[in-house]
Image (spheres, helix red, strand yellow):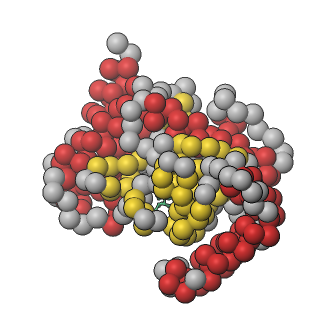
Amino acid sequence: MNRELDLDELEEKMHELLEEPEKKKRIKDAEYKKVRQLVFDQRTVRILVKLFNKGVIEDFTWIVSTGKEAVVLAGKGPEGEIAIKIYKIATANFKKYLDYISFDHRFVPTGDRARIVRIWAQREFRNLARMHQAGVRVPKPIEVQGNILVMEFIGEEGEPAPLLRDVYDMEDPELFLSEILSDVRKIYLEAELVHGDLSEYNVMYWKSKPWIIDVSQAVPLNHPLALSMLRRDVENVTSFFKKRFRVKVPDPYEFVDELVSSSQT
Ligand SMILES: Nc1ncnc2c1ncn2[C@@H]1O[C@H](COP(=O)(O)OP(=O)(O)OP(=O)(O)O)[C@@H](O)[C@H]1O
Ligand SMILES: [Mg+2]
């Protein structure tokens, strides 16, 4: 990039995105307010400017999701479409973050709010990187700066792929479930992590394949709750497939026992 973008220009860009009638239609009033609040968080805006000037982000195109803890924007980067996940500092769930962080030997807890959110974003980046390296279908992590994580976009033209939760029709649900479970195996055996929040809300359906997202809370295998989290993950996805698609599913306990014993041989 030849010319540096400044703060005012970025704010203007965000406002344009928010004001554009056709785009605004897609987000509810309450969500619109949430993104606006975020725009006015100067620290976050400064990091966005930095990412622009580094060339990591070239454009914003869409507001994908406005949740309790994070806002996800769609954008463009040098290699194609990107998802920009912005963790909110004001409404962060510090209790949850610290519960996880203090058990995780890779990170140390601290008292500073912004710093805890930064650690949380880094955690998602590192967990994504480990899973990606293990060959799991997760968005490829691109960059993390402060409370902002940039990753590969799952979807097309700013439109995110549907969540498994919203898929009612699927060619071969049994195969799809087995692909999710094979990713759970890879996460356990190769990345040596447990997702910890796996469900139909954190699996995207893209080009007939499962894509696993939202991995900030994933824990290493020596975490005291790793095994019970693994059981819950497997139970969540198998019971979803049983109910929604009425297919035969593996017994979660047997699956987990088999997985754990195969890691010990
Ligand atoms: N890489 C991505 N590509 C496209 N869409 C994404 C991507 N990552 C997340 N999304 C979309 O954003 C939504 C929220 O992302 P994610 O599940 O990671 O956040 P979250 O922690 O659940 O946020 P919150 O709990 O605050 O809603 C997802 O349900 C999905 O629709
Ligand atoms: Mg989620």
Q: Is residue 28 above or below residue 112?
A: below
| Image coordinates for residue 151, horizontal then vertical, percent | 53, 48
Quarter of the figure with residue 257: top left
Q: Is residue 3 above or below residue 254?
A: below
Q: Is residue 219 above or below residue 156?
A: above
Quarter of the figure with residue 179: top left
Quarter of the figure with residue 72: bottom right
- Give the residue at the far top of this rendering: 265
The tally of labels here is 0
> Along the horizontal axis of the image, is 212 left or right of 43?
left
| Image coordinates for residue 140, horizontal then vertical, percent | 48, 42
| Image coordinates for residue 150, horizontal then vertical, percent | 59, 50
Q: Is residue 257 visible?
A: yes
Residue under the image location 80 percent in, 52 percent down: 113
Q: Is residue 95 visible?
A: no
> Along the horizontal axis of the image, is 254 left or right of 150?
left
Residue under the image location 71 percent in, 57 percent down: 48
Residue under the image location 76 percent in, 38 percent down: 109
Q: Give the camera-side residue of 253 and 247.
A: 247
- Give the residue at the far front of this rendering: 2
Q: Is residue 1 above or below residue 13?
A: above
> Along the horizontal axis of the image, is 206 left or right of 197?
left
Residue under the image location 42 percent in, 33 percent down: 187
| Image coordinates for residue 153, horizontal then vertical, percent | 47, 54
> Along the horizontal axis of the image, is 227 left or right of 66?
left
